[in-house]
Amino acid sequence: MKLRVIVIGGGIGGLALAQGLRRRGVEVAAYERDRTPTDRLQGYRVHINTAGSRALHACLPPEVFAAFLATCGQPNTGIGLFTHRLRELIWFGSDRPDPDPDPVDGVKSASRISLRQVLLAGLDDVVRFGKAFTHYRREPDGRVTACFADGSTATGDVLVGADGGNSRVRQQYLPDAQRVDTGVTGIQGKVWLTAAVQALLPDRLVAGPVMIPGLRGLGMFLAMHQFQPVPPELAALVGPEAAAQRDYVMWGLLARRTRLPAGLEQLDAIQLQSLALQRIERWHPNLRRLVGATAPDTVLLTPISTSVPVPAWTASTVTLLGDAIHSMPPTGGVGANTALRDAALLAGELSRAAGGERPLYQAIGDYEAEMRRYGFAAVEDSLRNLRRQQRTANPLALTGMKLALRTVNTIGPLKRRAFTAV
């Protein structure tokens, strides 16, 4: 059957779906509210796990997947926990990168900016910019029409909401689906990586991210992103913005909202940076220097919300992917990977429906059943990690955790068992 798919949203999940459908010969059009491809050259490092990498490999044409690999940074080989005085509590993994990582199954470190530019490659005739979605309507012939703020419309056989945590598609389609505030807020920023900045950091950070539990429910996350030179033959494909990115360190400070002043949304970037410095005034001087060296235009406030599991619904020609249905705290590090997994799964199901291998409603229903299973499991895992971080509000609990981790770090079998449980 001839199938036309309308995708609302040009983020990671929506663009991966568009690439996957285009690759399989299914007609697709994606609509993004940004006016141009370079409107949102912001963002931080994205950890791409094996599932996310396999999904990208399934969705992208070979030359675009090669461009993705070329724009990745040095992959993680471990993850560690340090005290707020930068003493190591425990380290999981290796200190050295794999000399020959698997191009498909290997974990990767991607810049959100580079990844979005790569996902736009070859989609000039697919992605329409400057299209703010307002609502959809169902037509008498069973098709779906998307309506936009500028008065224009687009009609297709399937409409996919890939429009993020505040999805307007979800609000209309599943009005009872909830997205709630966790009570935790993040302040984050990036620092350009120089020799002086690198001297402030734990040596382990080169091999993987570091998490720092602190008193009163504070926690910090550090990660380094070092780019590889993009081969000249791929530079034109990914665009100058992705090809010319600078190495950086990102940091994020998590805190309970009740322990932060009112009116956070009214603070500018410099005021947010000052607030972060106040909250870590008794932490290691190097951490304060790192936050102080942050480029103010990279500092963001990120209230952390989470979706609530949704009971199964009857499949139709409207569906959802990524944060539009299962947004989650960043403490699991799998939000983008889950959206990519959605995109690959949905692209495969819709292409089978287009090829007459199964009815359209069955294909969408099968996608949704599987997506709900792993998507909301990822939400719960991320929430569990957030709760663990927040337990450090109790000084005795924090002291006990540090002692336990230092003990485990010295005993190989215990350490391997703890790593398996993480």
Image: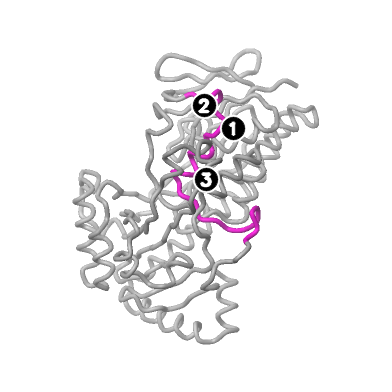
Q: Mark 3 sits on what residue?
A: 326
**The disc label shown at residue 18, or none:** 1
Q: Nearer the viewer, residue 4 or 98?
A: 98
SS assignment at label 1: helix
Which amino acid does the dot numbered 2 rest on? Val
- Contact between marks 2 and 1 (CB within 8 A): the answer is yes
Of badges 1 and 3, nearer the viewer stands 1
Q: Nearer the viewer, residue 352 or 121?
A: 121
Query: Would you say residue 276 sits in the magenta stretch?
Result: no
User: Taking the image as drawn, is residue 254 in sight?
Assistant: no
User: Residue at 45% across / 31% down in the picture?
Assistant: 168
Quarter in which the N terminus is drawn? top right
Query: Where residue 359 sits in the image (x, y, percent)?
Result: 76, 29
Query: As drawn, is 214 to the left or to the right of 168?
Result: left
Query: As drawn, is 75 to the left or to the right of 38?
Result: right
Quarter in which the C terminus is drawn? bottom right
Q: Earlier in the sequence, mark 1 or mark 3?
A: 1
Cα distance between the residues tagged 2 and 1: 9 Å
Magenta residue span: 101-128
Query: Where residue 241 sits in the image (x, y, percent)?
Result: 42, 40
Q: Nearer the viewer, residue 346 or 17?
A: 17
Q: Is residue 214 above or below residue 229?
A: below
Q: Earlier in the sequence, mark 3 or mark 2?
A: 2
